[in-house]
Amino acid sequence: MKLIRFVVFLPILFTLFSCSGEDEKNINDNSNNIIQLTGKQQRDTVFLHFNIPKKTIRAQRTGKLERLVENPEFKKNSLLIQFDDYDAFVELSGEKEALKEDLTNAIDNLPKSLNPVEKKWRDFATKLVPDKIMPAFPTMEYKEEAGFIEEAKIEEKYRAIQKKELTIQNYFQLSKEDGFITKVYAHSDDYVKKNSPLIAYHPKKIRVIAEASFPLTRPIIAQIKTDLLVRLPVDRVIRTKLSPTKITYSLTLNQKLDPKICPKYVIVNQKQNVFHIPKDFVGKDKKVKVIGEEMPYQAYSKNGDYLIYSDASSLKVQRP
């Protein structure tokens, strides 16, 4: 009878011990809220996108080219194009000489009442030189003076010559910025039409954008900049914009930039380890709580995965 009671009691005792142990385990176990992650170092690529604007200089007039720049490099305001301007200058010079003669004859017939302004007009006449730009037209002080000049048609002739002089300026084409010539479409002594392309070039200052699919840390940024300095003919590199995965540089070149030598990418060795984080361990603000760290880590989304970077080789991550 005692044996039977013991046999019945034994399963009950075993069940009690089992329930007691399970309760204690549930009270202290956080295995569902905390996971251990192992990081993996990787070689990543930073892609460089070069914005090398190609600009074209076109003919401002139809005519024969007297000169087209031959140097591959040019400075701002340097002469790039000169048209055959001989006939135009001869015509303009003749009109200036004729105006000077008409003005001198008019001054010789000035009424005595206008003697105070005679010197002013003679000085103006001496400045009407064929190979120089027209001087500013004098200010008229008296009503009688204005009538005298109008009767001789001096101002009318002056304005007509000044208009031609402004038009003839497009016989010369100056550069608007520093640059490097990449292609020449015409040559000296060629006859070209207005708006036809003459020179293609790219400016001395260009922009470079470096993009990565991971955070750009200071060492990586320094490596990109160093790589640019080594592989490109630059005088100066200035960082203009920075985001977690993109950096923009402004480059000042010291020689022509051939697209063949532009690096398309830079391989960088990450010092940090990359950790793949389960989606349900990432908070709404894309923060990941790492056990033992005061500040939460930023999670970066890539191809549907969430990644964080750390110098540690392993991390404990807690569910938010």
Image (cartoon, rainbow, N blue to C red):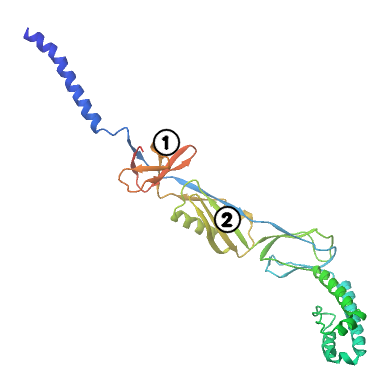
- Residue occupied by mark 1: 279
**C-alpha span from label 1 to label 2:** 35 Å
- Quadrant for residue 115, please give it: bottom right
Crowding at dot 2, Cα within 10 Å, few <14 / some 14-19 / many 20+, comes out as: some
Could you tell me residue 199's position as x and y percent? 74, 61
- Quadrant for residue 32, please give it: top left
Q: In which quarter of the image is the C terminus?
A: top left
Could you tell me residue 105's position as x and y percent? 92, 87
Crowding at dot 1, Cα within 10 Å, few <14 / some 14-19 / many 20+, comes out as: some
For this orientation, the residue located farthest to the left is 2
Q: Quadrant of the N terminus?
A: top left
**Is 236 on the left-hand or right-hand side of 154?**
left
- Residue occupied by mark 2: 208
- Quadrant for residue 317, please give it: top left
Foreground pick, 195 / 164: 164
Specify the label residue 142 is tagged with. Answer: none
Foreground pick, 239 / 230: 239
Could you tell me residue 42's position as x and y percent? 44, 45
Could you tell me residue 287's position as x and y percent? 40, 43
Write the residue at 14% across / 18% down: 13
**Is 275 on the left-hand or right-hand side of 51?**
left
Helix, strand or loop under label 2: strand
**Is 31 on the left-hand or right-hand side of 173?**
left
Write the residue at 84% across / 71% down: 163
The amino acid type of the residue labelled 1 equals: Lys
The amino acid type of the residue labelled 2 equals: Val
Write the residue at 86% across / 75% down: 161
For this orientation, the residue located farthest to the top is 1
Helix, strand or loop under label 1: helix
Q: Between tags 1 and 2, which lies in front?
A: 1
Foreground pick, 240 / 251: 240
